[in-house]
Image: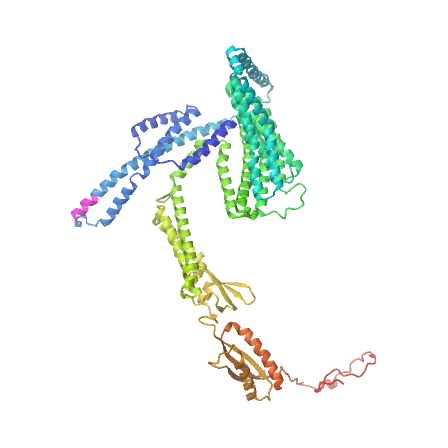
Amino acid sequence: MGCSVARQCLAGLVFLFWATLGAAQSTAPDYEQWQSVAERAERAVEAAAASDAAFNVVRSEIADWREQFQAQFSVNDSRILTLREQIAALGPVPEDPATEAEEIVARRAELNTQIQRLTTPQRTAEEAFSRANGIIAEIDRIIRDRQADELLNAGPWPVNPTFWPGALRNLGDTITAFGAGARQAWGNPTRRSEAQSNLPVTILLLVIGLLLVTRARSWSEWLALRIQLRNSRATADVAAFIVSLGQIVAPMIGVVALVRAITVTDMFGARGRVLLESLETVGLLLFFTLWLASRTFPSDDAVRGATRLSSERRTEARVYMFLLALVYAASFVLSQFSTFDRYSPATDAVLNYPLVIVASLMLIRMGWILRRVKSKSDDSKSDDDAGPEQDITRRVIALFGRGVIIVGIVAPLLATFGYGTAAKFLVFPTILTLGLFGTVRLLQSFVRDVYAAFTQDEAAKDTLFPTLASFAVVVLAMGVLPLIWGARVTDMTEIFSQIRSGVKIGDVTITPGSFFTLFIVFGLGYGITRAVQNALKVSVLPKTKIEPGGQVAIVSGLGYVGIFLAGLIAITSAGIDMSSFAIVAGALSVGIGFGLQTIVSNFVSGIILLIERPIAEGDWIEVGGQMGYVRSISVRSTRIETFDRTDVIVPNADLISGTVTNYTRGNTVGRVIIPVGVAYGTDTRRVDRILRELAEAHPMALMNPPPMILFAGFGADSLDFEIRMILRDVNWMMVVKNELNHQIAARFAEEGIEIPFAQRDIWLRNPETLQTRAPARPAPAAPETPNVDTDPDTDGTTR
């Protein structure tokens, strides 16, 4: 069973590699021969009496024919396209054909005749392709029905004691025949002589094999551990992973040497040959499991493994993984001898029943261990420091552990009641799935370590590229998983054949080739656009007299145009006819228009801002109560940095439809207004002269026009003046106001000019009521204090 699964997995991977490289045959198929093959296959399908192996042979032959037919789909495509363009150039057929010139009518008929002749091979191939598809579908249905019947049909009950003596007798006969074959070979003088002559080679191979099998694995594990413990960088992890593969390669070389040593002696019979043919598969299974267990559940606490468990749990997991592999290997060897000696269904049920029971018990225990992976370790109190990705991974592992436990409970029940095939179908693929998931986790860690080692950055493990590479590993594993769970290689090839033939959407067929063409052409166009943008931004535009806002507009506009053209060229290069999507796009545009009208409005407003440039980067603006400097203008919004150093994102539609004050547009010259109030009774001419002197003396004030002093009016508490002056740079407005206010306060103090504050007079409407009020309760006597009046007099003294 394991060997067949391994062969299926290998064949599936080989097909995945070669399916994309198959070249279309240029010669036309022999349709007469195809007719004979198709009729023979249809008779076999109708009878449904052939074996699965015979059906697989027929299916393979039909699939080869189907490939030939599919290659004819694109024959003469370029010539047919040219002819159709010629017909279109002749113009539409008039409503009254008699009014059209005879030369045009004759030419159109000739071109249509050529099109009919050139499309005949395509139509014939399409009909044959459909027939081949139908035959293949029928064969797949027959084989799947047989597999389902085998799983669902009950067989002999292994707990029935009447089947035990026969099963033990068959097993004993196999063991006896194995020894008899060896004795018979030893009794043959010729074979014994050849074995003696090959004795030096046999001994050398035995020594090498035993040494590698017993010691090579421990050497490789020790070296990998030393590398990983000496350095915690990703390079050490990569080196340790590569060195650890010696735990598989070196012992397998030893197994091959042992098998060759025994083969050279030729001291075995037919059943010994069956055992030798199984040893390499068994050895690979066992040594791979040991390596996987040591990397997933390391024995040293300092080594980072794929899971986090306590030392006791990791040791237990390693033991159970090896025992599961051992049970799987025993089942594989038993199936080989069962096929060779043709055991009865009762014997198979009895002999496989203990293996199913033992494997189920270990799966239950292994599932319990996997559920413990949900926490960082058995001793951890919290899991707060784990990221979302690690948390999701542990949840998936814990969920898979529950599934393993369920399999371990259900499988023995099925085997007990005669559904041995279904029980084995659950148990042994589950074991392989455990190994596959563990391998995927190790490969994901290895990919991240390789990328971190390549970039010399430990933090690069969590970047986009290693994440995508890890996802690709999962996708490849998903291609192997169906083969583990009973899918045939032909099922996988059928899926990929359908993918290769393309997905048809309306009149457009999207194939992997067209998809990759679309992706590559768009990627090239996008890269060229970015390169031209950078060249303009860095080398060309800074040497021109265009202002920074205009440079940004040119670079941004070029980017949008370039991306649009790249997408258009990519779609055209892929051969996708966008007219087929016109109706769908028109229907979707209505709904999208209502849902995205705000975004579209902001986008259009952004284009207007970049073209008209009413504001530019670096401008000091005020919009919607927000004041600050424009730092960036995108197609959807504009970022303003306020004077509090906070970023305000303003939708572009507000800048177009609202009121915007731009203080620095065109130049930085601007006016500042500084209000000043003096007490009533002050000489207004004197105040005017003082304020004018201060304003004209400031270095930021322009003299053309000169500063203006405005007597604004009579306020409630003061005589109100205003200094109105034009500044060289309005960005210094706040600094100028601050300096002038300080100068005004100092100069007024020198000149004795009072800056008033608010004063209020209080009038009592009924003052006589204060005299008629009842006397208040006398307060307790206060301690004697000096008669000090803390209220200041007008002269500032205290009584």
The vertical placement of 135 against 178, above or below, is below
User: Most prominent secondary structure in the magenta stretch?
Assistant: helix
Query: Is residue 358 positioned above or below 78 on the image?
Result: above
Q: Position of residue 76 (x, y in %)?
A: 28, 40
Q: Is residue 274 above or below residue 519?
A: above
- Displayed quadrant of residue 186: top right
Q: Residue 511, can we see it?
A: no
Query: Percent x, y for residue 728?
Result: 49, 75
Work out whether residue 543 or residue 624 is closer to the camera in this orientation and state it: 543
The C terminus sits in image quarter:
bottom right
Q: Is residue 541 magenta?
A: no
Q: Write down the region rendered in magenta.
A: 101-109
Q: How many marks?
A: 0
Res 20 visible: yes
- Residue 105 magenta-highlighted: yes
Q: Is residue 276 left or right of residue 536?
A: right
Residue at the spot 34% in from the left edge and 28% down from the top edge: 38
Task: Where is residue 166? Give x, y as percent.
Answer: 57, 16
Question: Of residues 358 and 530, which is closer to you in this image?
Answer: 530
Judge from the rendering whether residue 27 lies leftward or rightward of residue 219; answer left or right.
left
Q: Nearer the viewer, residue 65 or 414?
A: 65
Q: Return the x and y of residue 189 as percentages of the image width and height.
A: 52, 10
Residue 244 falls in image quadrant: top right
Answer with the quarter of the image where residue 295 lies.
top right
Name the image colouring.
rainbow
